[in-house]
DNA sequence: ACCCAGGAAATTC
DNA sequence: GAATTTCATGGG
């Protein structure tokens, strides 16, 4: 039985953070709180007037959750700095500025963003859920932990049929095998030269530049990463003409999330 | 029926 | 080597 209370957390917005396409395992409840699984813990998270509350039947590690929601980084300062770079970024920051870049498990980020390719967010969530139900450890009979690399490494692509991820099955197995064998050490990527880390991830079949960037941003907290997906290419083409995505500096990944969320919520800009 | 989705591999030119 | 096609699956 655990409960954590973090006070005076600004800027912060729970639905922006948990439902902006960086994590695929949080479900919103009717009262506006979210329930999800991190590692082997089922938690319910709510946010009101600067106070972030996390409750669980399991014991909660203060440091781990503070890190998960990136509470020790000064987002107000970063937001102000980014806003000065470009008028549209100022607009996107004002709109989506409650987003935090989560510190997800690296292996989970790797697999979920392999699944994300040529796919839509609604369907990604379904596939990830079935992956956990079929191959993750049961926590309370309803919620499941994300499968380990070991478990997935011992499967064949056809064993993944129940999750209905199609051509991505063999990519998932390849990724799990390279991680489980130790050929790729995800933790090492935290402070490796960025391009080198990207190249390392791209040894995996099914991981190109974009998926590698997402793994580095959402799984290894490389905040300089700026993943270019279809939405971002549209946004750069229409809202940031002439920009390539590498001009937002050390916190480009945060800028990217602001722009991604802002763009997805303003589809009419791209008609 | 057609088009698209937080792309990347396989094939072709 | 650069450009195009194909790859499962499901929703609109």
Image (cartoon, coloured by chain):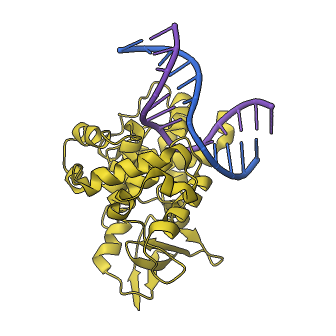
Chain colours: A yellow, B purple, C blue
The foreground one among A174 and A222 is A174
Residue C5 lies, in percent from the top left, at: 59, 22
Q: Quadrant of residue A52?
A: bottom left
Does residue A159 sit above or below B9 in this rendering? below
* A27 relative to A52 in the view: left or right: right
Quadrant in which residue A6 is drawn? bottom left
Residue A127, how many percent across, how many down? 55, 57
Question: Is residue A78 visible in the rendered structure shown here?
Answer: no
Q: How many marks?
A: 0
Give the position of the C terminus of chain A as an image quadrant: top right
User: Could you tell me which quadrant the N terminus of chain A lies in?
Assistant: bottom left
Residue visible at 42% across and 60% down?
A100
Q: Is residue A166 left or right of residue A220?
A: right
Asked if residue A35 shows in the view, the reply is: yes
Above or below, A17 relative to A157? below
**Residue sitting at x 66%, y 76%:** A30
Horizontally, is A123 left or right of A229 in the view?
A: right
Give the residue displayed 28% in from the left and 54% down from the top.
Answer: A179
Asked if residue A155 is positioned above or below residue C3 in the image, the reply reads below
Q: Nearer the viewer, residue A115 or A37?
A: A115
Tell me which residue sits at (35%, 83%) in the image: A60
Lateral position of residue A158 relative to residue A64, left or right: right
- Residue farthest bottom in this picture: A1
- Residue A186, percent across and down? 26, 54
Q: Residue A227 at what x, y percent from top left?
A: 42, 41
């Amino acid at each position: 039985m655990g409960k954590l209370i973090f006070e005076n957390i600004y800027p912060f917005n729970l639905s922006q953070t948990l439902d902006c396409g960086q994590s695929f395992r949080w479900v919103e409840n009717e009262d506006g709180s979210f329930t999800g699984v991190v590692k082997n813990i089922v938690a319910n998270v709510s946010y009101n007037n600067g106070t972030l509350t996390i409750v669980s039947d399991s014991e909660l590690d203060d440091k781990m959750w503070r890190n998960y929601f990136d509470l020790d980084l000064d987002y107000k300062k970063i937001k102000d700095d980014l806003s000065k770079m470009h008028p549209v970024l100022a607009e996107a920051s004002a709109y989506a500025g409650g987003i935090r870049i989560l510190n997800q498990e690296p292996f989970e980020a790797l697999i979920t963003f392999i699944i994300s390719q040529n796919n839509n967010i609604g369907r990604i969530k379904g596939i990830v859920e079935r992956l956990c139900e079929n191959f993750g450890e049961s926590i309370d009979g309803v919620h499941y932990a994300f499968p380990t690399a070991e478990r997935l490494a011992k499967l064949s692509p056809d064993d993944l049929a129940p999750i209905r991820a199609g051509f991505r099955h063999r990519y998932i197995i390849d990724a799990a095998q390279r991680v489980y064998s130790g050929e790729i050490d995800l933790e090492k990527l935290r402070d490796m030269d960025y391009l080198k880390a990207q190249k390392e991830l791209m040894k995996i079949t099914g991981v190109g530049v974009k998926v590698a960037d997402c793994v580095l941003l959402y799984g290894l907290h490389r905040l300089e990463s700026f993943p270019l997906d279809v939405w971002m290419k549209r946004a750069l083409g229409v809202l940031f003409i002439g920009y390539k995505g590498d001009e937002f500096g050390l916190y480009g990944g945060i800028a990217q999330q602001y722009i991604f969320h802002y763009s997805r919520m303003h589809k009419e800009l791209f008609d």
